[in-house]
Image: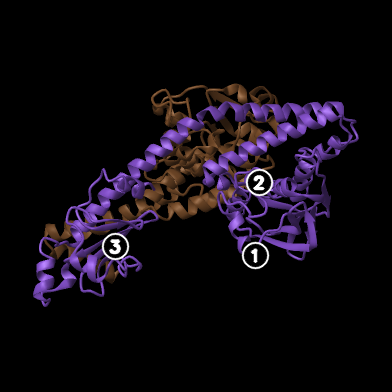
Amino acid sequence: MEYISGIVSWFENASWLANFFGICVPVGGVVLAFRKWVSSRKATGVSLPEVIEKISKSPNKIDAKALGKVAFVDDEISDFPIAELKKAGYQISTYKQVSLSDVAVLATYDVIFLDIKGIVKDDPEEGGLKLLSSLRRLNPNQKICAVSNKQYDVLATKFFEQADDVAKKPMTAQKCSDLIDQFFVEKFSVDRIEQVMVAESNALDKAKRNEYLGSLSVLVENQDDPRKAIKLDNTVFPKLFEATVDLVRIYRHVA
Amino acid sequence: MLLKEVFSTGSVATPWPVSIGELILSGDAGLSKTCEKKCKLSKACLSTHTSGESLCPHGLSYFAASIGETRIVVFGMKGEQVGTKISRELKLELKGRSLDERRFHGWVNSLGKLDKVIDNYILERQSELLDPLHDPIRLARQLESISVRLLDQTSSSAVRTVDAQLDHASTEMKSLVKAAGLLNDYFDLVSIYFNPAAARFGRPASMSLHGILRKITSILSGFEADEDGVKTKVIFRGECYRNFNLRESFKIIPFSLISNAVKYCLVGDVVVRLREMQDRVEVEVVSQGPPIEEDEIDLIFTKKYRGRWSKSLRKGEGVGLYLAKIVADAHDIQISATSRRLGGQMFGATPLATNTFRFEVPFQINK
């Protein structure tokens, strides 16, 4: 009681300004700290390890054919066994000709079979090479197979060297499905995705990381388009962005 | 690439005396007296590997640089290193011959641009000239895949592998499958010949070396007859059922070695031996043909080189072994060759030798 009366008399003796600061500063500090604690709890609602654990413990396994999207970009689509691949259950899209401005759409495919010549309206000669470079920049995790018989052409060397694999045309269904399956195994490897996400997210500052992880924890609980909802600049962190998109897709797929 | 040839026409002037890939040009300034009379172009400056400015034994500056593989040396000049304490005679001689590193490198850069323009032009023309190959390559692949399907349809269901099916196939079917296979292999050779980088294209994939050798030997065995109408057999011995991580271009190595052996085989058969060792597999291609002299062992793998004894026997371009070497380098594989004369045995006027081409593939290749 003596302590309380001492405090009361201290406030009575102090000026109104001292009373104001003496009460408001500690109360305000406690409120701010509490809000920060609440928001940090919210940001890490479902942490990355929890998402990974939920995927690995899910009774549903990854059905790569149902999850993965494949595009064939070639002016001679008949060189590919499209009907057989569709029949085998792969999700296939074909493009005979594209524009360089279509690159954002093409970057969303998991696997792309790309020709070098005659596929880009704006640049029929070297369009394939330009497109491949743009795709690499936008989505470094995308698997690209350079499909062309122009391996003899020194000017096409960069095109073949930048691709994940190289094939000649026409392609058999066996060769195509072997390549696609191998690409899917690599692209949908949860271990690889986790490694990329941990390594790349460490480069983010604390505020950005919290915001990014917050958007991830929300995305695994709703059905929003991850490309629109991830709070991360995909032009600066394309690898992390695309790995996160893949993780969300896998999570929703096995959930 | 063609700088030396361009300057040797005399249509392009150089401001200073210069050696371009050992072509000496006196340039607008002309040769200095020291270079012309004292040194007589004994070329001390041309045999060093320095870059930038250096001083020659006669006290004159020379400036060196390289453009690709072409060495450029501007000599008989007055650079910073000549200094001021020189004889009056030398001072007079070097009048109007001042050059510094900045000017020299500026000039070399412009030569580099000229070289690039020439190279790009050649590559663009080459690309245009080779463009008609695109469709034949596609058609050859179609042909091979149809021929293999036909072979499969006409073979009994118990025989599954292509080489085993070929053993039981009709002569026409054999020829069709072999010709289609050879056509594709030759197109692969052409691709690597024009673009050696193609040997490294694509990722290594798990392949059966035994299967590759079986297929190539069955395609090349008895396919081509020599001038006397004799068809050389290729016998395959040994086994290894491991898979190796190899690039698609790998098959060029055994294909080139075996087809080379078939081409120059003068007596008996070509034997392909596959032997599994502790941590690798060894492949040997052995045949009896014209000897390869000791000093030619490395040369036979260089472009356009043809062995002394073999060039008079068969027509050829000297590219098969060169291509095998390019692909072997892309896989970090060494190909070795040995040639042992068979006593005094002769084939007409040509001595006979046992020629062995050998390479090893480690189990851990490309892993």
Disc 3 target residue: B64
Kind of residue sitting beneath label 2:
Ile
Determine if marks 3 and 2 fall on one subunit: yes
Nearest the eye: A204 or B8? B8
**What residue do we see at 37% from left, 46% from top?**
B2
Disc 2 target residue: B252
Kind of residue sitting beneath label 3:
Ala
State which chain disc 1 sits on. B
Residue reaching furthest to the front: B349
Nearest the eye: B97 or B347? B347
Position of residue A37 measured from the top left corner of the image (x, y, whole percent): 39, 53
Q: Nearer the viewer, mark 3 or mark 2?
A: 3
What colour do you see for chain A?
A: brown
**Earlier sequence position, callout 3 versus callout 2:** 3
Q: Is residue B356 left or right of residue A233?
A: right
Asked if the residue under mark 1 is in contact with the one under mark 3, i.e. CB atoms within 8 Å, the reply is: no
Circle 1 sits in a helix, a strand or a loop, which is it? helix
| Residue A218 visible in the displayed image | no
Colour purple, chain: B
Disc 1 target residue: B294
Q: Quadrant of the C terminus of chain A?
A: top right
Circle 3 sits in a helix, a strand or a loop, which is it? strand
Position of residue A93 measured from the top left corner of the image (x, y, whole percent): 56, 25
Q: Is residue B91 left or right of residue B345?
A: left
Q: Nearer the viewer, mark 3 or mark 1?
A: 1
